[in-house]
Structure formats: structure tokens, C-alpha cells
């Protein structure tokens, strides 16, 4: 019986081997080993890095995302490496992955018998840094400009204003800039503001720490009174003009004296003796001189004006030539935070020979017994406009040069010592 029992087992094995499909044996031989030690690590707000050990016989790997609720899986990617970073994920969400090894034999893919152990990681949204150096940068007419240093990882900023009735801070707006101008304030009233950063990624928002309060008292500053170069002119023949405020046409007689906002033959605004603003052709005018005054604007007007214009400089200085008041003003600071540090009486170009526009300090040389600092230059003509010493004794504030700006020795020295080349020069 024992002999027949052993013989029967042998026959059974032979029978089974005979009927096992050849393809199954081939599949078993072609399968790569299983993937082991799968790890998942969050590497950014929307990315997860997967790493695993190399499987024996594997040529490539198939990565699947596992649905933890249903257990279903979805192919994410294939790779020949043992690491892969899944990108563009949703924020603040948990993800689970599994990896299979496979290889291709004669055009057919053979996968590992089992997938790797599952591994999970959660994406997150970074908390932006706290806002630092929140401050009052400048004042305008019943307005205030607030500035702050950019916060790390911030998408934007939320501004809050104190509500004295409710005794709490109320959100008044948001911005992506590192400054904001608050308008329509009441003169003499003190306001309090706070700010905090925020970061937004794929609809998710994280907020930074709320700043301390900043106080600002609104002022009335007549910024609209500040203007640039005007010309004195006379109507050379009877003509008509249009009143700016009403659109009414009026007649102007030959010899009428006006103040022109421009010079040329085109149409522009002029002011009559009584202050009426009209529009007319410059071809009807004879220009006699630059319209100037020796009455300077206040410090508040100067600062409010240059900050409202949004001038930027490559250095921490800004120079403003005002051809109307015959003054060169030097400011120190930065964008929308310029502070007046020196005002200088000057001689400007007669009949508008000093160009208007935005320029930069270019280079220095020596002339008229002192330093000369150019802010325009024509390389073809080898000539330009510059700041230099006064050349006519006693003429300190006038429209009398051929385009250069003449200053006292002390004022010229101040610019030479403090304002680097590249400093913005505004001629207005």
C-alpha cells in the first residue's frame, strides 16, 4: 500500500503539471519582485515625493493613487527610477499611494505579484510671514499712504481700520502691493490701521499674524496747486477760446495777456488774468517769458506731490526741479515714501530751455570752477544739461540759463556728495 501510495502521489503531480498552462509558468518566471519600503514625503504645498527600494528584475514601476474610502486605485505615472514626485495636488489633503514593479517581455507587461505597502502623506499650505515695519509712508490731501516690508510666502495683504463705534478693527480691503493709499479721510481726524499677510493656494487661504496698530492723522494739503512749467504769453490776433468749465466759446482780443500751460501751435489750456481756464490754439499766442514765482510750495505740498506721482529712483535720493518756483528739491527715501531733505534756489533755462521729463544723474566733470553733474547727454553733439555753479553773480533764482541748472557752491556740493549716479531727476 505504501508503494502504491507514493506512486499515486507521483501520478497526481504529473497530471497537474501536464494540465497547468504554459503561459502561467512563463508569467511566474517573468514577474519582477515586489516593491518594498515605499515612503511618501510632502515636499511642497502641492507636491509629494515617493521613494522605494529597487525590485529584482524590474525595468519600470507603475504608481497608483489609492482611494481610502472605496479602496479603488488610479494610475498616476510610470517611471524607471525608484523615486517620483507627484505634483499639482490639492492643498490640505491626504494622499495614499502604492507602487507595482513591471517589465516588458516580447511586447507584454508582467507586473509584480503584489503591490508595495501603501504609504500616505498630506499636503499643506504654508503660513505666510508676519508683516514687518508697517508704517505711515506719506500724506496727501486728506489721504495717507501706508507701507510695509513684504512678508515671506505672502500672496497679498488684508488691511483693517479701527471702528470707534464698534470698538473693533474692520476689514477695509486687500492688496497684493506692499503699500496702500487710504483716501477720503476727514481733516484732523486720527485713524488706526492694522494689517496681516495671507497666502492663497488653489482656493485655500492661510493668514499671517496681525500687526500692531499704526496711527495717522489726516491733513488738508493743497496738492492741486502744484504745477509745472508755464509761459507768459500775449494774444497776437483776435481769436476765440473755449471755457473749460462750461464749454462756452468766448472772444479774446489782440494783446490779451495769458498764462499758457504749454508752448507750440497745438491746442492746450491757458489761464486768463481772472483765473478762468480756457482752451485755445497756441498759434494765436506770442510767448514772452517763462512764468515763474519766488513763492515756494510748503514742505508738505512738495512731499505730497512727489509721492502722489509715484516716482522711483535707482538710489535712495530723488531730485525734483520745479521750473515754476525756481527751486531744486532733494528728497531721501523710496517709492511713495520720499522725505524732503533740502530745497535750493536755482537758475533754470530761459524760455523753457531746460527739458521736461524724468532723467538720471549720469556723470561728473569739472567746469566753471567746480563740479558739473550731467542729467542729460547727447553723445552726437557731445552736450547735455547739468547742475553746475552759478556763472552770473547775484543771479540766484531766475530763468536765465541755456538749459543747465545753476546752484550755489554749497547746494551743488550737497548733490555731489550725497546723490549717487543713477539718482532720478524730475524736471517739471
Image (cartoon, rainbow, N blue to C red):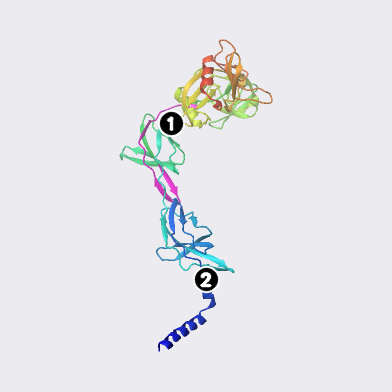
Q: Residue at x 42, y 62 (%)?
A: 118
Query: Which label number is shown at residue 137?
Result: 1
- The x, y position of residue 14, in whole percent, is 49, 83
In this view of the protein, can residue 172 be seen by the observer?
A: yes
Camera-nearest residue between 318 and 41: 41
Camera-nearest residue between 273 and 24: 24
Structural distance between the alpha carbons of marks 1 and 2: 76 Å
In this view of the protein, can residue 182 be seen by the observer?
A: no
- The x, y position of residue 353, in whole percent, is 62, 21
Q: Foreground mark, 1 or 2?
A: 2
Image position of 244 with respect to 168: above or below: above
In the rendered image, the residue lying farthest to the right is 380
Camera-nearest residue between 6 and 407: 6
- Which quarter shows the N terminus? bottom left
Q: How many marks?
A: 2
Magenta stretch: includes residue 427 = no
- The x, y position of residue 385, in whole percent, is 61, 22
Residue 179 located left or right of residue 405:
left
Residue 415 located left or right of residue 143:
right
Magenta stretch: includes residue 201 = yes
How crowded pointer 1 is (Cα within 10 Å; few <14, some 14-19, many 20+) is rated as: many
Of the two numbered discs 1 and 2 on the same chain, state the one appearing first in sequence: 2
Image position of 267 with respect to 364: above or below: below
- The x, y position of residue 77, in whole percent, is 51, 60
How crowded pointer 2 is (Cα within 10 Å; few <14, some 14-19, many 20+) is rated as: few
Query: Which label number is shown at residue 29?
Result: 2
Image position of 126 with respect to 409: above or below: below
Q: Residue at x 53, y 59 (%)?
A: 80
**In the image, which residues are magenta?**
197-224
Q: Secondary structure at mark 1?
A: strand
In the rendered image, the residue lying farthest to the front is 3
Q: Secondary structure at mark 2?
A: helix
Amino acid at each position: 500500500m505504501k508503494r502504491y501510495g507514493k506512486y499515486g502521489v507521483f501520478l497526481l503531480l504529473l497530471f497537474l503539471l501536464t494540465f497547468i498552462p504554459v503561459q502561467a509558468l512563463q508569467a511566474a518566471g517573468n514577474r519582477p519582485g515586489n516593491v518594498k519600503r515605499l515612503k511618501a514625503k510632502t515636499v511642497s504645498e502641492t507636491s509629494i515625493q515617493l521613494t522605494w527600494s529597487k525590485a529584482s528584475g524590474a525595468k519600470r514601476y507603475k504608481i497608483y493613487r489609492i482611494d481610502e474610502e472605496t479602496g479603488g486605485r488610479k494610475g498616476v505615472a510610470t517611471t524607471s527610477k525608484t523615486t517620483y514626485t507627484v505634483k499639482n495636488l490639492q492643498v490640505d489633503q491626504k494622499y495614499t499611494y502604492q507602487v507595482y514593479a513591471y517589465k516588458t517581455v516580447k511586447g507584454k507587461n508582467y507586473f509584480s505579484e503584489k503591490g508595495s505597502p501603501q504609504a500616505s502623506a498630506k499636503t499643506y499650505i504654508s503660513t505666510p510671514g508676519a508683516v514687518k515695519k508697517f508704517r505711515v509712508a506719506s500724506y496727501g490731501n486728506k489721504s495717507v499712504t501706508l507701507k510695509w516690508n513684504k512678508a515671506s510666502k505672502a500672496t497679498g495683504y488684508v488691511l483693517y481700520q479701527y471702528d470707534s463705534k464698534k470698538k473693533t478693527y474692520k476689514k477695509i480691503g486687500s492688496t497684493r502691493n506692499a503699500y496702500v493709499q487710504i483716501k477720503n479721510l476727514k481733516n484732523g481726524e486720527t485713524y488706526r490701521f492694522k494689517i496681516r499677510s495671507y497666502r492663497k493656494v488653489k482656493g485655500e487661504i492661510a493668514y499671517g499674524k496681525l500687526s500692531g496698530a499704526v496711527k495717522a492723522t489726516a491733513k488738508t494739503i493743497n496738492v492741486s496747486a502744484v504745477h509745472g512749467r508755464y509761459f507768459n504769453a500775449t494774444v497776437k490776433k483776435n481769436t476765440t477760446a473755449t471755457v473749460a468749465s462750461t464749454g462756452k466759446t468766448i472772444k479774446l482780443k489782440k494783446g490779451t495777456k495769458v498764462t499758457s500751460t504749454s508752448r507750440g501751435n497745438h491746442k492746450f489750456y491757458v489761464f486768463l488774468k481772472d483765473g478762468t481756464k480756457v482752451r485755445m490754439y497756441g498759434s494765436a499766442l506770442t510767448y514772452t517769458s517763462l512764468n515763474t514765482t519766488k513763492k515756494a510750495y510748503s514742505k508738505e505740498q512738495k512731499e505730497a506731490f512727489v509721492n502722489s506721482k509715484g516716482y522711483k529712483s535707482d538710489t535712495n535720493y530723488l531730485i525734483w526741479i520745479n521750473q515754476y518756483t525756481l527751486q531744486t528739491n532733494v528728497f531721501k527715501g523710496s517709492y511713495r515714501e520720499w522725505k524732503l531733505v533740502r530745497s535750493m534756489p536755482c537758475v533754470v533755462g530761459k524760455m523753457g530751455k531746460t527739458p521736461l521729463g524724468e532723467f538720471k544723474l549720469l556723470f561728473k566733470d569739472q567746469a566753471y570752477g567746480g563740479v558739473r553733474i550731467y542729467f542729460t547727454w547727447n553723445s552726437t553733439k557731445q552736450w547735455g544739461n547739468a547742475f553746475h555753479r552759478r556763472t552770473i553773480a547775484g543771479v540766484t533764482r531766475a530763468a536765465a540759463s541755456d538749459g543747465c541748472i545753476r546752484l550755489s557752491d554749497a547746494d551743488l556740493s550737497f548733490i555731489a556728495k550725497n546723490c549717487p549716479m543713477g539718482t532720478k531727476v524730475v524736471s517739471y
